[in-house]
Amino acid sequence: GASLSRTSAVFGNMCSSLNTDETKEVQTAMVPLLSRHRSATYTLPGLFEKIQAVYNLRLDSASNLTDEQVRLVERVHMDFTRAGANFGEEEKKEYAEIQAQLASLQTQFQQNVMKDEETYEMILKKEDLAGCPDSLVEAAKQVAGERGYNKKDGEEKEDVYIVTLSRSLVEPFLTFSSRRDLRQEAWKAWTSRGELDPSRDNLSIGRDILRLRQKQAKMHGYSTFAEYQCADRMAKTPENVMDLLENVWERAKVCADKERMELEEYAKNIGEDVEGGIKPWDWRYIAEKVRTEKYDLDEAIVKPYFSLDKVTEALFAVSNRLFGLKYTKRTDLKLYHPDVVAYEVRKEVGEGEGDLQAIFLHDNFARPFKSSGAWMSEYRSQTKNLPTNADSIESIPIVSNNNNFAKGGDSDGKYSPTLLSFDDAKTLFHEMGHGHHGMLSDATYSRLSSTSVLMDFVELPSQLMEHWFDEPEILKEYARHYETGEPIPDELLAKIQAAKSFQEGFRTIEYTSCALIDMALHSLSEYPDDFDLTKFEEEELGRLGMPVGIVMRHRPAHFSHLFSTSAYAAGYYVYLWAEVLDADVYAAFRESGNVFDPDTAEKARKFIYSAGNTVAPDELFRQFRGRDPDISFMLEKKGLSSAGAPVS
């Protein structure tokens, strides 16, 4: 079991970070085999009966179990129950087949998305990049060079620039390109991932996944998959989820409609060509112009202050001030790609270094064969439950943060570092929040350690970490111009702070529409043969009153959170749920008068980052805050407090 777990962890990470065609073949073949093996393990004759016996006696004083052991018994019992261990023999076989089919379909869904992202190229000449900042032009040229366009057989060729479907390339292109026709072309490809090639039909795969999940839910006695998923989350029921989503949705619609009118008025005043009104491929472009005029804030002026190197330095400094962690680069470790950087992480004790806390891997750049987006993963989770003859190093977590930034490089004879947008920099902090959840874990059992928590708690550590990058003292220290080393001017910093809630309606609609579609899809009780995901998306968004000019951030054919794994299915709401928690937690830091207050930081370490699943998440929050969460902090942070819906 231990050898399989270790191998599976490495292989699973490679399937996300370096999923070559050869690896995909192995993945496709192995996924159903591993699924059936897991099912066979959970349904091993006589095993569940023993677990049930321990579960029945877990609260008996004679059992002499610690609170953590009681929690372990309850979670393991839940694992086995949800794996079908208490089913009859025929049901066990049926359930194992459902799980194997789901594993194969979810893998195929993700591979299809990755293939679309790997193969799509918008081939441009330099003049096609009119309006784009130098950093984007250089990144597009760098990609073309990596793909062999600008040099062949050692000879220089005519310059070619490539925009791929990597978010770090396509979003800036949609934001800055003055070519409306090219923005439309890029937008259509970007929002059609998973359906760019008829041989990669993710809409049909998605429908089949939904059917299998519904069968799964019914076998457990639930009428819908949404009910099944929510039963083991903080939310408890789909109705509680919808109460939150609808509250925020109605407020965000008011804000987004105001934002659209502002954009249309601006476009009209400057004579910008937006025939037919603001379209989705216009929104970011016009919004950036409005932002530049309204706040005198130009993204092209901001980015030079956010080099990846300096933001990483800020990240490690915040980690050190909050939790005493020190990061030392390890160039001697053999890694899977030259872009990956490894660090040894130790807890500082007084003037010296303490014991090894973790090994941390930073994999920051977009490349072929790598999944899009950003994520944290582990090659080994923290545990204290080792065999007597095991090396103590086996208790140390190996944590990886993965991003997809457009890599800087040599352009026109000079080196250009990787420059981040403010949002990219926040993403770096977000993933480190997950990283802290793994590195600071202090559980006895790996089943309860790290991020093995209920899904609507898992985004609290990550979203909480984002707040520190908003702090002026951090920005003043680490936001420095990559060429001059000068700190960001106070005037520019003030403009960034003033513009924080600009376009919050747009961003909230982009996200919340995805969460609402997710819950609606998984709340259906059947999916007929002619069920059409695209038609469902269109009709449901119409019913919800989707604001004109905005689309879902993740449309069904590439909604990997939903269809490449079951973890976030009927669970995309968890980011908003956790936002209620993180805004409330950060308010505690502010109330202390010092956002690095040692006592508050220690409470955050103890109850948020280190406890894992050793205690129920609602109880952990109460232990930190002394009460249940208050939604008002989140609404205030998003600028939605007075947007016209009652607080609940």
Image (cartoon, rainbow, N blue to C red):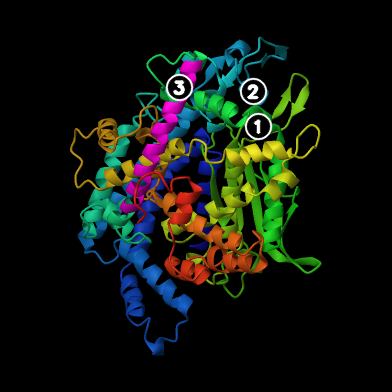
State the separation of the CA atoms marked 2 and 1.
15 Å
Give the numbered dot on residue 265.
3
**Badge 2 is on which residue?**
133
Name the element at disc 3: helix
Please identify, in this view, whether the residue under mark 2 or under mark 1 is nearer the observer.
Answer: 2
Q: Residue furthest bottom?
A: 62
121 and 35: which one is in front?
121
Residue 256 part of the magenta-drawn span: yes
As drawn, 290 above or below 41: above
Q: Magenta stretch: dominant SS?
A: helix
Would you call the spot at circle 1 few (<14 residues within 10 Å), some (14-19), or many (20 or more)?
Answer: many
The image quadrant of residue 238 is bottom left
Image spot of residue 178 (x, y percent): 54, 16
Please identify, in this view, whether the residue under mark 2 or under mark 3 is nearer the observer.
Answer: 3
Name the element at disc 1: loop
Residue type at tag 3: Glu
Residue type at tag 1: Lys
For the point 66% across and 40% down, which residue is it?
Answer: 494
Image spot of residue 388 (x, y percent): 59, 75
**Badge 1 is on which residue?**
407
95 and 469: which one is in front?
469
Would you call the spot at circle 3 few (<14 residues within 10 Å), some (14-19), or many (20 or more)?
Answer: few
Q: How many marks?
A: 3
In magenta, the rendered stretch is 243-269
